[in-house]
Amino acid sequence: MLKRILEGNRSFRTREFDPNRSHYETIAKGQKPEALFICCADSRIEPGKITATRAGELFVFRNVGNIIPPGDTGIAALLEFAIPQLKISTIILCGHSGCASIRALDREPADEPVFRWLDFARAAQERVDAQIPLPRTEEEKDERFRLIEEENVRLQIGHLLTYPVLKKAVDENRVEVFGVYYDLTTGELTRVT
Ligand SMILES: [Zn+2]
């Protein structure tokens, strides 16, 4: 795999970097991204490609399940860097279809790191299950997962807004926060409101 990655990098330099050298030289001097894009670590999501943005435009943060734990030092540092330093004006939190983290919410919880992590998303499952009848068909089961994946976007935006640096910036209209949902089966990104 490493060999393939290094060969791929040679191909990237020939096809993309060299023909766009002035763009890469400009961004090498400093970044000025306008948006922070938060999404799942899932290998099937390529933030730059699915939004047709170039290197330097998106400040990207990823983890398993696009989960934002409240009171987390890493998230606090991310927002401190993104808002006062980089002056980012848009934050996009992206959920996606077929998210393994959301499916894992249905497994029997155990004292393992993955479940302690998923606890930060469990309220999304509980909210959806309280609102819909028990799914019976495969279609209904898939629809339930989609609803939980979308609800998790709203839940994690709520967690983001518990961070004072972001809450203040939103209240002062310096930053807007949006939720989006990426469908792996169609490549479409839609708003989650
Ligand atoms: Zn995922």
Image: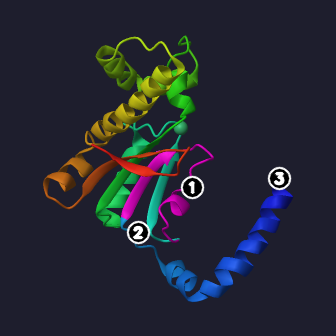
Residue linked to disc 1:
46
Three-letter residue code for mark 1:
Glu
Residue 1 sits above or below residue 8 on the image: above
Q: Is label 1 or label 3 in front? A: 1
Q: Residue at x 20, y 55 (%)?
A: 169
Tell me which label, 2 or 3, sits earlier in the chain.
3
Above/below status of 127 relative to 185: above
- Label 2 with label 3: CB-CB less than 8 Å: no
Number of numbered labels in the structure image: 3
Highlighted range, magenta: 35-54
Drawn side of residue 72 relative to residue 60, left or right:
left
User: Measuring 38% from the left and 49% from the top, which residue is drawn there?
Assistant: 190
Q: Which residue is mark 2?
A: 33
* Nearer the observer, 143 or 16: 143
Residue 72 in which image quadrant: top left
Mark 2, Cα crowd under 10 Å, few <14 / some 14-19 / many 20+, is some
Residue in view at x 55 percent, y 22 percent: 104
Dot 3: element: loop
Q: Amino acid at mark 2?
A: Pro
**Closer to us: 52 or 120:** 52
Using a 10 Å C-alpha cutoff, classify the residue at mark 3 as few (fewer than 14 neighbours), some (14 to 19) or many (20 or more): few
- Residue 20 in the image: above or below residue 94: below
Does residue 7 show up magenta in the picture? no
**Label 1: few (<14), some (14–19) or many (≥20) C-alpha neighbours in 10 Å:** few
First of labels 1, 3 by sequence position? 3
Name the spot of residue 4 as percent of width and height, x first.
Answer: 83, 60
Q: Could you say which disc has been placed on residue 183 in the image?
A: none
Which residue does the numbered mark 3 point to in the structure image? Answer: 1
Amino acid of disc 3:
Met
